[in-house]
Image (tube, grey):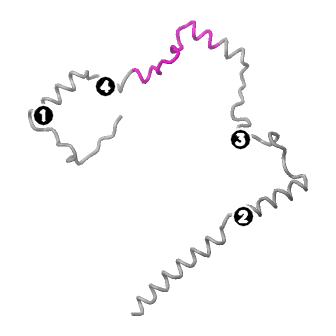
Amino acid sequence: MNGRLTGAVFALASVLSGVVFAQAQAPARRADVNAETRAAAEAGQLIPAGQGPSAQDGVMASTRKRVDVEAETRAAGRAGLLAPTGMVAPKVLEGNGSSWTRADREAQTRAAARSGQLIPAGQGTEVVPKR
């Protein structure tokens, strides 16, 4: 009986501590946020829209001039190094790197089916990840 009482007290304490913790971390009310914003505006602490630091400051900065990039692109186009517009990257067109043809894979599968080596769907034990 004493063990059950201790367990019940522990469960009640853990539930109540969660409620107390949630109340301590409650988000600020809208009215509070508005009041803080008004006070900061009156004190002149707000940064005008569009004048503050941006999330992309320095991220897209290039060290090369636009003219140089355009010249390099034109040279690559003349050399045939650019993929035609709308085409997929050459790496994707190469396939998965298999040396087997479709006919080879089909023949192997038919041979395995004839010899009873295929595992029925849903009965496999191991999942082989794709390459």
Amino acid on which the number 2 mark rests in the picture: Arg
**Magenta-highlighted residues:** 72-93
The residue indicated by pointer 2 is: 29
Which of discs 2 and 4 lies nearer the camera? The answer is 2
Which of discs 1 and 2 lies nearer the camera? The answer is 2
Amino acid on which the number 3 mark rests in the picture: Ala
Mark 3 or mark 4, which has the lower sequence index? Answer: 3
- On the image, the x and y values in percent for residue 107 come to 16, 25
Hey, which residue is sitting farthest top in the picture?
A: 78
Q: Which mark is residue 7?
A: none
Mark 3 or mark 1, which has the lower sequence index? Answer: 3
Amino acid on which the number 1 mark rests in the picture: Ala
- On the image, the x and y values in percent for residue 13 come to 53, 82
6 lies left or right of 42 = left
Q: CA distance from mark 3 to mark 1?
A: 58 Å
Hey, which residue is sitting farthest bottom in the picture?
A: 1
Label 2 sits on a secondary structure element that is loop
Q: CA distance from mark 1 to mark 4?
A: 22 Å
The residue indicated by pointer 1 is: 113
Amino acid on which the number 4 mark rests in the picture: Ser
88 lies left or right of 17 = left
> What residue appears at the point 34 percent right and 25 percent down from the top-left corner?
97
Mark 2 or mark 4, which has the lower sequence index? Answer: 2
The residue indicated by pointer 4 is: 98
Local packing at callout 3 (Cα closer than 10 Å; few below 14, some 14-19, many 20+) is few
Q: CA distance from mark 1 to mark 2?
A: 68 Å
Label 3 sits on a secondary structure element that is loop
Relative to the observer, which residue lies in front, 123 or 36?
36
Hey, which residue is sitting farthest right in the picture?
A: 43
Mark 3 or mark 2, which has the lower sequence index? Answer: 2
